[in-house]
Amino acid sequence: MKQLLSILVLACAVSSPAWAAVQTVTLSVPGMTCGVCPITVRKALDAVPGVEKVSVDESKKDVVVTFDNAKTNVQAFIKATTDAGYPSIDAGAAK
């Protein structure tokens, strides 16, 4: 019985990364008005665990974040940008 339980626990531990998925979200950051703003926003998002890539489009005031959804979520990105002084919203949810 203990051996079966051990095998089951090991199987779950090995397969759990399969549940994670790389996702992309676009955030609208209307407060980015100068050349330094995108740098600050990028640093704030890069500091969130699970973020794999951050692409800032200063002219559109958009940020595309690629992330591991098992480690983080959109709310963490909104909090990170807001805490850095640049409130953001999920551009996809705003439509």
Image (cartoon, helix red, strand yellow):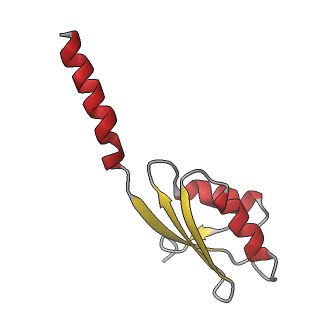
Q: Quadrant of residue 84?
A: bottom right
Q: Residue at x 68, y 57 (%)?
A: 80
Q: Is residue 29 above or below residue 9?
A: below
Res. 87 visible in picture: no
Residue at the outermost top position? 1
Vertical side of 9 occupied by 61: above or below: below
What x and y, as percent, mark residue 13?
33, 33
Q: Quadrant of the N terminus?
A: top left
In front of the other: 7 or 22: 7
Q: Give x and y (percent) for residue 14.
A: 31, 37
Outermost bottom residue: 59
Number of numbered discs on residues: 0
Residue shown at the point (63%, 54%) measured from the top left: 48
The correct choice, above or below, for 38 with respect to 20 in the image is below
73 left or right, relative to 2: right
Left or right of 61 in this view: 64: left
Q: Please tell me in which quadrant of the rendered image residue 22 appears.
A: bottom left
Q: Is residue 47 above or below residue 41?
A: above
x 67%, y 74%: residue: 29
Q: Residue at x 52, y 54 (%)?
A: 73
Residue 46 shows in this picture: yes
Q: Position of residue 77 (x, y in %)?
A: 61, 59
Frontmost residue, 86 versus 20? 20
